[in-house]
Image (cartoon, grey):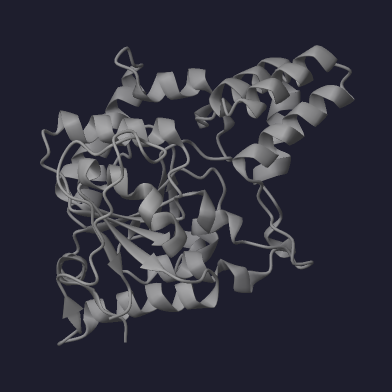
């Protein structure tokens, strides 16, 4: 039986943990031929550039690829959407993110299914697809909330939702106008000059952050803009959030450590994706209901001391760096 942080198990038992799901969970889903169903961020934009080439928009395709080569993903997405306006953009996104469930290898939904075993009736995600709905305990009854504030979010905060629900913070494929993908879209959601519906969504996110502990799955935190916005929310809340938990591969632990203190985040590491990770998450769900779960408050804590500016996101400003392993 794995050892889990004491507070994480306690928060689970109290209904205070909110799963927050990133692209890695959807990326794990494969079709019947064993191929990934959903693209990576880079693959998506490379396909958009190829679509522009197919439409004989050579200069725009080259501009998208130039931004990609510089790692400017949001700017590349903006150029791609500008080049594929109207129905072409709509059809492109549907082709990428709205597969037929009949083509899916259902066994590859196991990671998403294990996240529902943690007991929360609400899951937050930045993904556009329907993987979490497919994996929910009751797929036909599973509600999906778009970016705008959920109508019954107060019930969700209190843990009183009767049906499973997925809040698509960055929009969902069923409502294409809700999707947050480009630099312009991010500004709509996160900037200080927000439309009313997006301002309400951000206020809801702050409410969740202050009242719940987030458990992040499928994030490598390569999306710097998202990380910046989460940090801004934490700053706005004057440090009153967390602790939060991120399940990350062991190889990612040291790289992510510089930002751990800023987010009041503990990294729960695992050695392998696939069945071992699924089993780990399921055992965490089981620990939630055990009378005497095996707990630990401090396991193999690692405190790397990178020089200022080291790591992808720069040095930590607040607190220490913690990396919790899943095995004792």
The residue at 40%/76% (across/down) is 280
For the image, the number of numbered tags is 0
Residue 182 falls left or right of residue 280: right
x, y percent for residue 69: 66, 28
The residue at 31%/45% (across/down) is 306
x, y percent for residue 218: 46, 55
x, y percent for residue 132: 49, 57
Residue 229 falls left or right of residue 83: left
Q: Residue furthest front?
A: 307
Q: Is residue 217 visible?
A: no
x, y percent for residue 54: 88, 26
Q: Is residue 178 above or below residue 323?
A: above
Residue 281 falls left or right of residue 205: right
The residue at 79%/66% (across/down) is 33
Q: Is residue 146 visible?
A: yes
Q: As rendered, which of 118 and 70 lies closer to the eye? A: 70
Quarter of the image that includes the C terminus: bottom left
Q: As rendered, which of 285 and 101 lies closer to the eye? A: 285
Residue 320 falls left or right of residue 229: left
Q: As rendered, which of 296 and 105 lies closer to the eye? A: 296
Q: Is residue 166 above or below residue 115?
A: above
The residue at 26%/62% (across/down) is 302
Quarter of the image that includes the N terminus: bottom left
Q: As rendered, which of 159 and 221 lies closer to the eye? A: 221
Q: Is residue 123 above or below residue 235?
A: below
């Amino acid at each position: 039986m794995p050892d889990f942080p004491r507070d994480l198990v306690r928060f689970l038992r109290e209904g205070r943990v909110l799963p927050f799901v990133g692209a890695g969970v959807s990326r794990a889903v494969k079709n019947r031929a064993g191929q990934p169903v959903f693209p990576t961020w880079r693959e998506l934009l490379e396909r958009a550039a190829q679509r522009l080439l197919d439409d004989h928009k050579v200069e725009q395709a080259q501009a998208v690829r130039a931004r990609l080569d510089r790692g400017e993903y949001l700017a590349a997405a903006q150029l791609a959407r500008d080049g594929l306006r109207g129905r072409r953009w709509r059809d492109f996104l549907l082709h990428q993110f709205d597969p037929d469930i009949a083509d899916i290898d259902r066994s590859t939904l196991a990671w998403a299914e294990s996240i529902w075993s943690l007991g929360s009736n609400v899951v937050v995600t930045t993904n556009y697809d329907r993987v979490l709905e497919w994996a929910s305990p009751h797929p036909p009854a599973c509600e999906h909330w778009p970016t705008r504030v959920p109508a019954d979010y107060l019930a969700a905060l209190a843990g009183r939702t009767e049906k499973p629900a997925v809040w698509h913070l960055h929009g969902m494929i069923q409502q294409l106008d809700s999707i947050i993908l480009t630099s312009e879209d991010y500004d709509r959601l996160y900037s200080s000059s927000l439309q009313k519906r997006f301002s309400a969504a951000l206020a809801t996110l702050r409410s969740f952050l202050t009242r719940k502990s987030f458990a992040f799955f499928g994030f490598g935190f390569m999306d710097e803009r998202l990380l910046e916005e989460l940090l801004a929310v934490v700053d706005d809340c004057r440090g009153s959030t967390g602790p939060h938990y991120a399940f990350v591969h062991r190889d990612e632990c040291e790289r992510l450590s510089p930002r751990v203190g800023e987010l009041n985040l503990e990294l729960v590491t695992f050695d392998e994706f696939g069945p071992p990770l699924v089993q780990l998450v399921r055992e965490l769900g089981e620990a939630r209901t055990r009378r005497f779960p095996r707990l630990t408050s401090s396991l193999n804590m690692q405190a790397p001391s990178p020089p200022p500016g080291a790591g992808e996101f720069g040095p930590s400003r607040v607190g220490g760096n913690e990396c919790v392993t899943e095995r004792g």
